[in-house]
Image: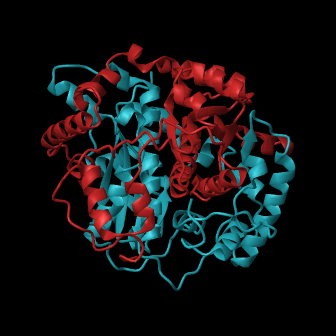
Chain colours: A red, B cyan
Amino acid sequence: MSDASDASLEDAADLLAARYREPTRPTPAHWSAVLDTMLSHRSVRGFLPSTVPAATLDLVLAAASSAPTSSNLQTWSVVVVEDPARKARLARLAAGQKFIEQSPTLLVWLADLARLEALAAARQQTVEGIHYLELLLVAVIDAALAAQNAVVALESLGLGSVYVGAMRNDPLGVAAELGLPKRVFPVFGLSIGFPDPSISTGIKPRLPPAAVVHREQYSAAAQPRAIAEYDARMSAFQAEQKMGPEIWTEKVINRVRTPASLSGRDRMREVLAKLGFELR
Amino acid sequence: MSDASDASLEDAADLLAARYREPTRPTPAHWSAVLDTMLSHRSVRGFLPSTVPAATLDLVLAAASSAPTSSNLQTWSVVVVEDPARKARLARLAAGQKFIEQSPTLLVWLADLARLEALAAARQQTVEGIHYLELLLVAVIDAALAAQNAVVALESLGLGSVYVGAMRNDPLGVAAELGLPKRVFPVFGLSIGFPDPSISTGIKPRLPPAAVVHREQYSAAAQPRAIAEYDARMSAFQAEQKMGPEIWTEKVINRVRTPASLSGRDRMREVLAKLGFELR
């Protein structure tokens, strides 16, 4: 195990306290530079204009490729978008979020079953399994594991990122823009770049372990109290960040209250069918 | 950016060369302890009997909680399974893989829409959005991002892990064993523990960037050559590891050739319906 030589244990206690907003969080016995990076995570929505050096992107994508992948199928791909005009068009497809245009590079992570299909076709074989919902899950998970390695790798090199789930608001538009073949689905975007140091953001608190971590079997018994505490902690965080007051519970309920709350993503089954995912 | 003081740049070039099995991989200009951990990744299937200290697990789960989550919905949970009898029963549901029983702890990562539903129900509200395929994707992605942080955090502390996709062979059996409520789906397992040092495994090569990374638009033009190179590199890796010869392309085609190749996961739609996912 690593010890205090890797990263300051005092910082460790502070970072853990910030993540859970529990002031009594004890200093851990072990720590690592990886934990330091992960516990320090903040999504970045304000970027400097500096481009991401090609060599840095290569390293980050090597980290992505190093993530585990189901049965080594490697059913993911990524499109690196740096052309400002294309980035602007993709931003319009993704709720017009400003940081997409402002960041120098947009990575679009793909669930890619076309590669397997092409391999089989080149050998006059078919791969009927790719038409099942299971393979969409495999490919989405592969893409997510790779992307999350990229996120942490970027932060370790002084860069920042923010996921763009709104890339799923109009997957057909994204597919047309990126020239995606059938059986390739844009899972999410990731805007990356150097964080604007004039914008400081705090560490966003997360649900306490009592709400998320179950022992041996699932139990929701501790959730009401844990979530009430979390609502209070999030309100305090919002106030500190000079953001409008909001109750987490109310916000997340509103986010999924109706099909219309899903920003077009209530049509995902139909959209996936058009992209060539039969979801048997 | 970090520099050579963080981790040896010589190791960096070796690790990059091993991951892509391209002997000409140049020494990078920048490096970090995070990249060192990620590029060193190997899945671990041989564990020492030592248990995972509770404080270590707490840190690893704090890293998981620090991962980004879509709209801060936090639609994931995890069940920590340490009871040997339960672990053995779960192993039987997951293709009888020996490492599940051998490892001291099995984490079962859940796509959890029940928490949102319970929050709404407590306020006499409904959340119709959770019944859409989009929300299953959100929750699966949330679980994957959290789990991948846990994987890297574990490795940074000297532990190891292996994902258990076979937890999806019989999700209804897993749900019964773990007492999962409706609208909670076991996405995958993760067996964790201290690696048995007597079992050494090499760094598994991944597809070259030419097969995975696209610039501005998707292009499969470079794939045939890149994949032919990869097949040769994987064959060399297998020989080094004293594993039976196999051609990657043939192996992955066989893995998805027919519905029967999916080890029961061709019934995923029906299974998800029974777990309360309408997938509208």
Which residue occupies the extreme left position in the image?
Answer: A225
Question: Is A226 placed above or below B206 here?
Answer: above
Q: Position of residue B276 (x, y in %)?
A: 34, 31
Which residue is more in the foreground, A8 or B109? A8
Q: Is residue B95 visible?
A: no
Which residue occupies the extreme front position in the image?
Answer: A198
Q: Quadrant of residue A112?
A: top right
Count the labels in the image: 0
Residue at 85 percent across and 48 percent down: it is B224
Residue at 60 percent across and 71 percent down: it is B4
Which residue is more in the foreground, B212 or B134? B212
Q: Position of residue A33 (x, y in %)?
A: 44, 66
Side of A254 where A51 appears, left or right:
right
Q: Position of residue A79 (x, y in %)?
A: 69, 38
Q: Is residue B94 visible?
A: yes
Which residue is more in the foreground, A213 or B82? A213
Residue at 22 percent across and 46 percent down: it is A211
Residue at 25 percent across and 50 percent down: it is A20
Q: Position of residue A231 (x, y in %)?
A: 19, 36
Picture quarter with the C terminus of chain A: top right
Side of B32 where B231 appears, left or right:
right
Question: Is A261 placed above or below A49 here?
Answer: above
Picture quarter with the N terminus of chain A: bottom left
Which residue is more in the foreground, B63 or A39? A39
Which residue occupies the extreme bottom position in the image?
Answer: B198
Question: Is B260 placed above or below B45 here?
Answer: above
Q: Quadrant of residue B79?
A: bottom left
